[in-house]
Image (cartoon, rainbow, N blue to C red):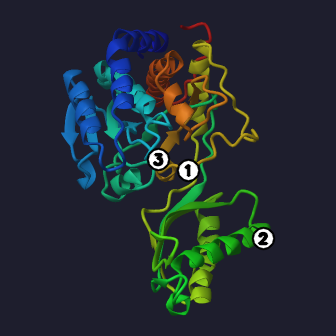
Amino acid sequence: MPDAAALRRGAHDAVESARDVVLGVSRALHADPELGFEEHRSAAMLRSVLADAGLRVEAGVGGLPTAFSASAGSGRRVVALLAEYDALAGLGHACGHNVIAAAAVGAGIALAPIADELGITVRVLGSPAEEGGGGKIVLLEAGVLDDVDVAMMVHPGPADAAYARPRAVAHFDVVYDGVASHAASYPQLGVNASDAFTIAQVAIGLLRQQLPDDVRVHGIVREAGTAPNAIPDRAVGSWYVRAADLAQLDALFPRIAACFEAGALATGCSVELTETSGRYADFRTDEALLAAFVRNAAALGRDMDVDETRPDGMHTASTDMGNVSQRVRAIHPYLGIDSLPAVNHQAAFADAAATPAADRAALEGAILMAQTVIDDALAHLEPDAPAAHHPEEP
């Protein structure tokens, strides 16, 4: 039986040896943010780094040009390390996906030389368009994860948190079409598309009293006319509905859709509502994997918050990693980057994602995922053996 402690120390040392590569990935992605499904430079750079490290690289998996797979080992059990690298429009890497990708690369590099010893195939899976678009859903539907047994990633946040509790979410666009007219001379000839959104938002506001506490409805109006003296004949918006799980989302979505239909009915506009990706699922945490991650984090001096009821909502957003977790054993812990008062999806968080604290999260995320994979793989090599407790390790 392989020496678990030695393997964990080896993974730690391997990531430290690859420090310049890991941090170079994080900083390069941060300096050159690309939007979902447009991450061509980012994906090419990640593929090149992983190929240089000796992994077998395949571009364009699942029919997505900016997705990729980089594998090492030939074991029957497949472990996927999910890399995200898309940015937010106007905000750059304000969710820290540069850190996510760097940690996945570092863990893949550390695990590649020992994958066969562990009886696994390790796969760094590049998944585009997490910030809307559902790249992982596309990969799931294409069968890219059909052979995967374990999937994991780490995500930067304001503070450490072991549990991911993302909500299910539906992303959709709303388009109202009306009739343009002069707003002063011939208003009676117009059908105001902008007014339709006003009515819809009032209806949603009134509906909130009857919505469960864990439901969120939010969005933006992207287009609502071009001149104040011209009645808008077209209005366009993008909206999200979040719920505790897919079942609750399915039940509530028609009520939200009815609010937008009310805007059309009241104004005389036509309305088109189009979901822009598959629905993101709620997240299912694998407790055994998470327990190993938390133990390893303690050895690095990270006291992971395991309170599932924390009030700040930091880790209750939505992710297509939830869909992955519905299929395979998965974890999605958060590593703090000392960003407070800035939180994810704020411009100041983008700044925080390129700091020494973010560098530490990228390196330690790589170490912790590699060590957790080691613990899990050894547990499957010897299923009856209890997980080792090792707070003294570096």
Assess whether mark 2 and mark 1 are in contact (beta carbons under 8 angstroms): no
Who is closer to the viewer here, 266 or 257? 266
Tell whether 356 sits left or right of 162: left
User: Foreground residue, 377 or 65?
Assistant: 65
Label 2's element?
helix
In the displayed orientation, state which residue is furthest to the bottom.
188
For marks 3 and 2 on the same chain, the one whose residue lies earlier in the sequence: 2
- Residue 91 in the image, given as x and y percentages of width and height: 47, 41
Q: Which residue is mark 2?
A: 210
Q: Residues within 10 Å of mark 3 (few under 14, many from 20)?
A: some
The kind of residue tagged 3 is Val
**Residue 92 at x, y percent in the picture:** 43, 38
Q: Which mark is residue 318?
A: 1
Task: Name the amino acid type tagged 1.
Answer: Ser
The kind of residue tagged 2 is Gln
Vertical comparison of 329 with 12: above or below? below
- Report if residue 359 is visible in the image: yes
The reply to whether discs 3 and 2 touch (Cβ–Cβ < 8 Å) is no
Q: Is residue 67 above or below residue 275?
A: above
Q: In the image shown, does 335 or 113 lie closer to the viewer?
A: 335
- Residue 394: x and y in percent read 53, 7
Mark number, residue 328: 3
Q: Report the mark closest to the observer, 3 or 1.
A: 1
Residue 96 is left or right of residue 283, and the answer is left
Q: Is residue 336 above or below residue 97?
A: above
Q: Quadrant of the N terminus?
A: top left
Residue 44's image quarter? top left
- Count the numbered circles shown: 3
User: CA separation, marks 3 and 1?
Assistant: 18 Å
What residue do we see at 51% from left, 90% from top?
186
Confirm or deny contact between disc 3 and disc 1 (CB under 8 A): no
Q: Residue 257's spot in the image, x, y percent?
A: 58, 76
